[in-house]
Image (spheres, rainbow, N blue to C red):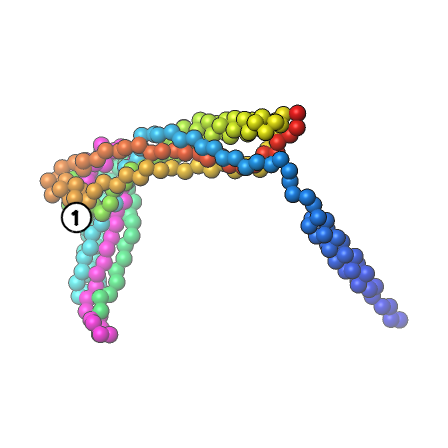
Amino acid sequence: MFVSAPSTRPLLFIAITGAASTAVQAQTLPPPQNVVSLSSSATVEVMKDVLNVAFSTTREGTDAALVQSQLKAAVDAALAETRKVARNGQIDVHTGNFSLFPRYAPKGGGITGWQGTAELLVDGKDIVGISQLTGRVSTMSIARVAFGLSREAREKVEADVTARAIADFRSKAEFVSRQFGFGGYSIRELNVSSNEGGQHVVPMMRLQAAKVADEALPVEAGKASVSVSVSGSVQMSPK
């Protein structure tokens, strides 16, 4: 006995009709009234407490295996020196980029040699210890130096800065509402974001001079700016 399946066309028609009705209602809704957009921010300066130093070395030659071996020897020697003073969170040591690539003759010629680079990264809160360490690494050169703010130092001030920015936003919302003759306000939407500024990079000429003299790296941490911004819109309410 053959039984035909129930038709789904009426259901489909109802669904489409309902969706169309919702779209029409959305188009006919009046725009929100008595809504104002506001923004506020707060900033505090904090002394940077992390020093980041990148050592690098370059080797080249006609034998790829020999170039790679020379790079490895330079990194191993630097690691042996830096590990003597490594302390978790204070002086952390880890390897960085290690690359080896061919050099070609002009006009589509074949491989004429190989060149490779290697990095060793040192960072931590012991700024004095790291700056003294730079003068004892003889197989690699200082490629770059930068100061930063640790997560602990940032979190210590971020809550206070956020509270200031929010208080300023609320004060503005209250002031604007009163000025327009309203009794108060309610928050429609709110966005809170934070950022850190004030990057400090030590000039390379100073780094090279310190390296030649086998002395501690002359550094000055400087300050970082921790900023929090609050933006959004409020619905002003009648008295």
Rendered residue at 60%/36% (across/down): 35
Q: Viewed as shown, does residue 40 lie left or right of 212?
A: right
Q: Residue at x 23, y 58 (%)?
A: 116
Residue 118 in the image: x percent, y percent?
24, 53
Whole-percent x and y of residue 121? Answer: 27, 44
Q: Residue 108 sits in which quadrant?
A: bottom left
Residue 60, placed above or below residue 46: below
Q: Quadrant of the N terminus?
A: bottom right
- Say above or below: 96 vs 66: above
Q: Residue furthest right?
A: 1
Vertical arrangement, residue 103 with respect to residue 225, above or below: below
- x, y percentage for residue 161? 43, 29
Q: Is residue 88 visible?
A: no
141 or 168, which lies in front?
168
Range of magenta residues: 105-134
Q: Is residue 231 left or right of residue 133?
A: right
User: Would residue 237 appear left or right of 92 to someone viewing this image?
Assistant: right
Q: How many marks?
A: 1
Which image quadrant: the C terminus? top right
Q: Amino acid at mark 1?
A: Thr
Q: SS at mark 1?
A: loop
Most distant residue in the left direction: 213
Is residue 103 visible in the rendered image? The answer is yes
The answer to which of 183 and 116 lies nearer the viewer is: 183
Is 190 included in the stretch rendered in magenta? no
Viewer-proximal residue among 75 and 169? 169
Apparent side of residue 230 relative to residue 148 in the rendered image (left or right): right
Query: Label 1 belongs to which residue?
Result: 139
Based on the picture, tell me whether residue 130 belongs to the magenta stretch: yes
